[in-house]
């Protein structure tokens, strides 16, 4: 199952804890970045947002994903993660908008983020 499928599995309500943890872990492994507090970047805010998400702090996770998008407004992974956090909060319209943007910025991979 690809990363996008895991996200939509979570959205449909199947094993949300496993899906969210898998999504976050795969994003970090795939990017291969390390956290450097002296060098903020889109990836570092994505990572921090994932940490907030995994601890249930959805508002802070969304805020970090939004900061990541200020560094790179075409960062599909940040839209995908923000969509997951919004969906978890019950913000369905915002989540759909984010998933749509994530797919728009990554169409070359057939929907897989």
Image: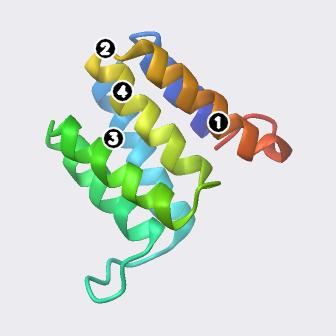
Vertical comparison of 56 with 35: above or below: above
Q: Which mark is residue 86?
A: 4
- Of the residues under marks 1 and 3, which one precedes in the sequence? 3
For the residues labelled 2 and 4, the Cα–Cα distance comes to 6 Å
State left or right for residue 31 relative to residue 38.
right
Seen from the viewer's position, the closer of residues 22 and 63 is 63
Q: SS at mark 1? A: helix
Give me the disc on residue 90: 2
**For residue 63, above or below residue 111:** below
Residue 72 location in percent, x, y? 57, 63
Tell me the crowding category of disc 1: few under 14, some 14 to 19, or many 20 or more residues within 10 angstroms, Cα based.
Answer: many
Question: Dot 2, crowdedness within 10 Å: few (<14), some or many (≥20)?
Answer: few
Question: Please, which residue is most extreme toward the bottom here?
Answer: 38
Q: Nearer the viewer, mark 1 or mark 3?
A: 1
Determine whether label 4 and label 3 are within 8 Å by CB. no
Residue 16 location (% of width, % of height) = 33, 22
Front one among 2 and 111: 111
Q: Which residue is mark 1?
A: 101
Within-10-Å neighbours for mark 3: few <14, some 14–19, many 20+: some
Q: Of the two numbered discs 4 and 3 on the same chain, state the one appearing first in sequence.
A: 3
Residue underneath mark 3: 21
Write down the quadrant of residue 99 in the picture: top right
Which numbered disc flags the more N-terminal residue, 4 or 1?
4
Report the label total.
4
Q: Where is residue 27 shown, x and y percent of the image?
A: 49, 54
Q: Quarter holding the N terminus?
A: top right
| Residue 100 position (above or below residue 61) | above
Q: Earlier in the sequence, mark 1 or mark 2?
A: 2
Q: Name the residue located 80 percent from the left edge and 44 percent from the top edge.
A: 109
Marks 4/3: CA–CA distance: 16 Å
**Residue 73: image location, x then y, percent:** 59, 56
Q: Secondary structure at mark 2?
A: loop
């Amino acid at each position: 199952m690809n990363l996008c499928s895991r996200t939509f599995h979570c959205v449909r309500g199947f094993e949300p804890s496993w899906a969210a943890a898998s999504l976050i872990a795969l994003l970090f492994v795939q990017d291969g970045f390390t956290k450097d507090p002296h060098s903020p970047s889109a990836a570092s805010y994505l990572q921090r947002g994932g940490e907030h998400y995994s601890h249930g702090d959805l508002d802070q996770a969304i805020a970090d994903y939004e900061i990541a998008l200020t560094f790179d407004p075409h960062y599909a992974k940040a839209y995908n993660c923000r969509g997951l956090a919004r969906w978890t909060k019950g913000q369905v319209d915002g989540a759909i908008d984010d998933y749509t943007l994530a797919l728009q910025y990554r169409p070359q991979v057939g929907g897989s983020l």
